[in-house]
Image: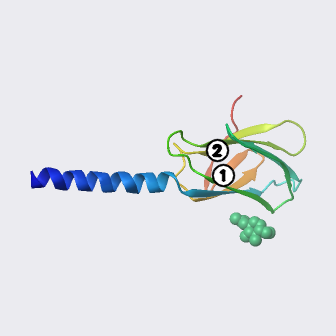
Amino acid sequence: MIFLLKLLIVSSMMRMWVSAKAIGRVDVSINNYLQNKLDLTVHCKSANDDLGEHIVPYLKNYTFTFKKRFFQGTLFFCSFQWNGPLHWFDIYDQSRDDCDDCLWEITETGPCFYSQCYEWNKS
Ligand SMILES: *[C@@H]1O[C@H](CO)[C@@H](O)[C@H](O)[C@H]1NC(C)=O
């Protein structure tokens, strides 16, 4: 009985910790590392928010902050353009990312998260 009670307390504490983590604030920073040194046009959206278009000069950044949603995972996707076609990337995916300060470096071939580089979305 005592054991069961302890189990209950520990599991509810764990659940509180998980939910505190799940509703925290997240900063996403998008840094222009295009080797051609062109301005980068960034436009990010989620299901609920359209953050508008932002022009990021070479080696500068665009940063936005949001609160994670507890029930539906948060997803922000962005378009990126310098000369020519739009490229897309899921810049924050709650099921993929565990960062509170998410620092992205945008290159021609795709975004890099620290030394991990990704390709643009296919579609
Ligand atoms: C973004 O740019 C601002 C202003 O130039 C700078 O203070 C800040 O350190 C930069 N942030 C990142 C993550 O590079």
* Residue 43, image quadrant: top right
Locate residue 102, reporting x and y percent.
62, 57
Q: State if disc 2 and disc 1 touch (CB < 8 Å).
A: yes
In this view, the residue in front, 43 or 50, is 50
Identity of the residue drawn at 69% across and 30% down: 122
**Image label count:** 2
Quadrant (top left/top right/bottom left/bottom right) for the C terminus:
top right
**Mark 2 surroundings within 10 Å by alpha-carbon count, few (fewer than 14), some (14 through 19), many (20 or more):** some
Residue at label 1? 112
The amino acid sitting under disc 1 is Cys
Q: Please, what secondary structure does the residue beneath circle 2 have?
A: loop
| Ligand 1 shown in quarter | bottom right
**In this rendering, is residue 2 above or below 83?**
below
From the top left corner, tell me how far across and down residue 107 is, in percent.
75, 50
The label shown at residue 118 is 2
Pinpoint residue 67: horizontal percent, then vertical percent: 60, 53
**Residue under the image location 28 percent in, 51 percent down:** 11
Which amino acid does the dot numbered 2 rest on?
Tyr
